[in-house]
Amino acid sequence: MTASAPPAPAGPPAFDTLSALLHTRHSCRAFLPEPLPRATIEQVLATAQRTASWCNAQPWQLTIASGATLARLRAALAAAVPATPPAPDLPWPREYRGMYQDRRRECGFGLYDAVGIARGDRAASAQQVALNFTMFGAPHVAIVSSDEALGVYGAVDCGAYVGNFMLAAHSLGIGSIAQAALAAYPAVLRDVLGIGTDRSIVCAISFGRADPQHPANRFRTTRADVAQAVQWRD
Ligand SMILES: Cc1cc2nc3c(=O)[nH]c(=O)nc-3n(C[C@H](O)[C@H](O)[C@H](O)COP(=O)(O)O)c2cc1C
């Protein structure tokens, strides 16, 4: 694994800007409660809307909850999650194996170390997982859904959109985190937010200003060397 550190300038300004954004973005797991100006959110949305998609179908739709609606969603999740088995619209990974399991563990332990959860402390780690359903205190959450008929490639397009949304947000100093955890409870999301069954819920993005003091925001993940991801066939 290699640590992610902001790179030295290495190319034209556009490359350096994008590279710096990619190297400094991180998932935010503690937010300040103040809502963002609508115009700022719209800037992020207009930029992410440029995402490429198969046949330019642009299958993503966002249902953005803030204020009283977000409070209702938090309350509904708090009531449902402990009593309801996960039932995501899209199948979850069957297994994390080999290096994927190793990376998953490293990422989990990094977070737990940052927030002071000891290895094996199941109660504390369950509490950390439960913070997903508070949206980590974010003032906004976007539920990202795809047209159900587009299947797996609709979800691929939404994934690209999510990445671009998070980068655009970061470029404006806005923290964000993609959350598959919320997609495990589509019935709750549909009920509170009025999302139809013709939409597959892909994931959520919680966003707002990061709490700079919170230890969860001091933890950074690494990335594997490019050589582990690429095979050249000359
Ligand atoms: C599609 C997707 C779903 C994710 N779901 C969750 C989640 O439910 N809860 C969580 O804490 N982090 C979630 N994450 C954040 C990842 O753990 C994080 O992106 C990864 O560890 C890399 O760290 P970084 O985002 O700080 O670079 C998700 C990320 C993606 C892209």
Image: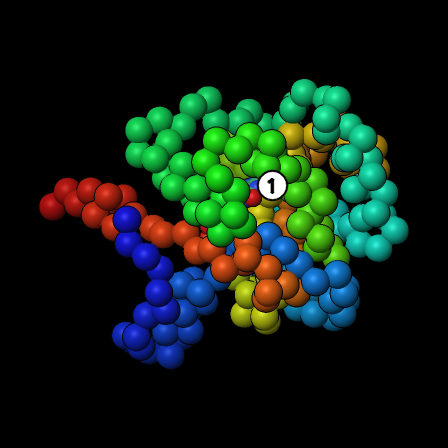
Residue assigned mark 1: 128
Left or right position of 226 against 164 = left
Q: Quadrant of residue 59?
A: top right
Q: Position of residue 91 (x, y in %)?
A: 55, 25
Q: Position of residue 131 (x, y in %)?
A: 66, 43
Left or right position of 13 against 180 = left
Q: Position of residue 207 (x, y in %)?
A: 66, 57
Mark 1 secondary-structure assignment: helix
Give amino acid for label 1.
Gln
Q: Quadrant of residue 176?
A: bottom right
Query: Residue at image x 52%, y 42%?
Result: 117
Query: Residue at image x 69%, y 47%?
Result: 135
Q: Residue furthest right?
A: 68
Can I make out residue 203 in this image?
no
Q: Quadrant of residue 67?
A: bottom right
Q: Position of residue 89 (x, y in %)?
A: 64, 27
In front here: 226 or 84? Answer: 84
Left or right position of 227 against 140 = left
Can I make out residue 183 in this image?
yes
Query: Residue at image x 15%, y 42%?
Result: 233
Residue 69 position (above or below residue 129): below
